[in-house]
Image: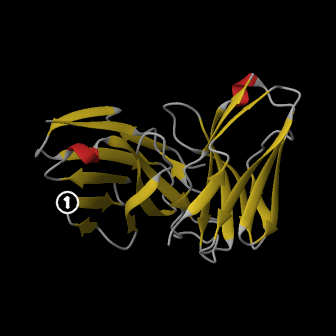
Amino acid sequence: DTEVTQTPKHLVMGMTNKKSLKCEQHMGHRAMYWYKQKAKKPPELMFVYSYEKLSINESVPSRFSPECPNSSLLNLHLHALQPEDSALYLCASSPTAGVKNIQYFGAGTRLSVL
Amino acid sequence: GENVEQHPSTLSVQEGDSAVIKCTYSDSASNYFPWYKQELGKGPQLIIDIRSNVGEKKDQRIAVTLNKTAKHFSLHITETQPEDSAVYFCAASPTGTASKLTFGTGTRLQVTL
C-alpha cells in the first residue's frame, strides 16, 4: 500500500482564521514533505521532516507552521494567510530523506483564502 | 541551485502515436531523475525514474533516457492511450542531505481519439 492520505480535500478560510491540514501515511516512511502547487505550475517544496525533525524549511513565511507529532503524521498549521496562499497543498513521504528515495504524494488539499 | 527546463509545455497526439517530453537540468551533481504523472484532482504519481549510472530504462510503454554529458533526459511513451492524458513533470535531485526534488514546468499531454 503506497497511500498518503490528506484531509481535508478542500478548505476555505478567511484571512483571520486558524486551520490545519493533516497528512497520514502507514508505509513506515521516515521522511515527510509539504509542497505548494499553484495552478498550472509544478510543486514547490516547503518543508522536509526526517525522523520527525524538521530538516528543510524553504524560507516559508511563519504563517505556515509544520508539525510532525509522530512518524506517521504530518500537520501544517495555517494562520493569518493571504489570498495569494490559495493553492493545492501536497504532502509526500519517502522511506528516508536520502537522495534517490521515491516520494509518494497524496491527493492534496485545495485551499482557498478569502 | 538546480534548474530544470521542460519542453514542450503542451503536446497533443493521436491515440497510438508516440509522445516525447524533454528536460534539461543545470546541476551536474544531480543523479536521480524521476517522472511524475498528475491527473486532474490528484497528486503526482511516479511513473518511472532513472539514476545517473544508467542511460536508459524501460517499463512497458514508457521509457526514459539520460544523457549526463549533455544534462538532459527524456520521457518516451509509445502506443499512447486516452488514459495517458495528464500533466507530466520531470524532476532532478542533486546530492544533498534530503530528497530535494526540483521539478520541471510540466507538459500537458492530450491523447485524442
Q: Quadrant of residue B49?
A: bottom left
Vertical placement of residue B11 versus B73, above or below: above
**Mark 1 belongs to chain:** B
- Along the line of sight, the residue nearer the viewer: A1 or B95: A1
Q: Secondary structure at mark 1?
A: loop
Q: Position of residue A114 (x, y in %)?
A: 75, 21
Name the residue rendered at 46%, 38% in the picture: B105
* Residue that badge 1 annotates: B61
Question: Could you tell whether B16 is left or right of B60 in the image?
Answer: left
Q: Is residue B97 visible?
A: no
Name the residue rendered at 40%, 69% in the picture: B51
- Along the line of sight, the residue nearer the viewer: B55 or A24: A24
Question: Could you tell whether B33 is left or right of B93 in the image?
Answer: left
- Along the line of sight, the residue nearer the viewer: B52 or B17: B17
Colouring used for the render = secondary structure
Residue type at mark 1 is Arg
Question: Could you tell whether A25 is left or right of A66 in the image?
Answer: left
Q: Position of residue B8 (x, y in %)?
A: 31, 35
Vertical placement of residue B49 versus A28, above or below: above
Q: Position of residue A108 (x, y in %)?
A: 59, 47
